[in-house]
Image (cartoon, grey):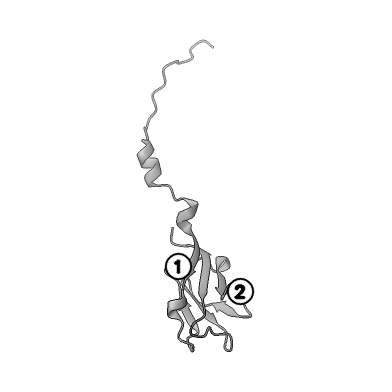
Amino acid sequence: MAGLKVDFTPLTQISSSAVNANTIYFRDWQINNEILSAQITGVQLLFTTVNPFFSDSLCVYLDGLRQLLGVDYTVTGNDNFTFTAGNEPLSGQDLVVDYRRSDL
């Protein structure tokens, strides 16, 4: 152990506030229970989320029932999806989505 240097000075010091400012928490990028019911007109097929999402993460619930991708709806963009004809929500129904944000 000859020649071992015992004093160590880091090249860069990072304060805990700097680390926290650059940390994205799970709760920030996972959106649960975003309510889209206000967009329902009875004839509307296209619905838009507040944030862009990963297409494989979108879960759509109509009146509490999970809708099937490719059967009940299709993803048409990074922040919107379309119900298939005949499956569009009717006025008074509840439309809720869960997804992972893709913009963080």
**Mark 1: secondary structure:** loop
Q: What is the x, y in percent for residue 12?
A: 37, 33
- Please tell me which residue is depicted at 54% across the width and 85% down the height of the picture: 88
Vertical arrangement, residue 6 with respect to residue 57, above or below: above
Extreme residue toward the front, this view = 92
Q: Which residue is mark 2?
A: 65
Q: Report the mark closest to the observer, 2 or 1.
A: 2
Vertical arrangement, residue 19 with respect to residue 34, above or below: above
Quadrant of image for the C terminus: bottom left
State the residue in front, 7 or 49: 49
State the residue in front, 59 or 41: 41
- Please tell me which residue is depicted at 52% across the width and 85% down the height of the picture: 90
Mark 2 nearby-residue class (10 Å; few <14, some 14–19, many ≥20): few
Image quarter of residue 16: top left
Q: Which residue is mark 1?
A: 52
- Please tell me which residue is depicted at 47% across the width and 78% down the height of the picture: 47
State the residue in front, 100 or 67: 67
Amino acid on which the number 2 mark rests in the picture: Leu
- Rounded to the nearest angstrom, the CA distance separating label 2 from label 1 is 23 Å
- Please tell me which residue is depicted at 50% across the width and 84% down the height of the picture: 45
Amino acid on which the number 1 mark rests in the picture: Pro
Image quarter of residue 72: bottom right
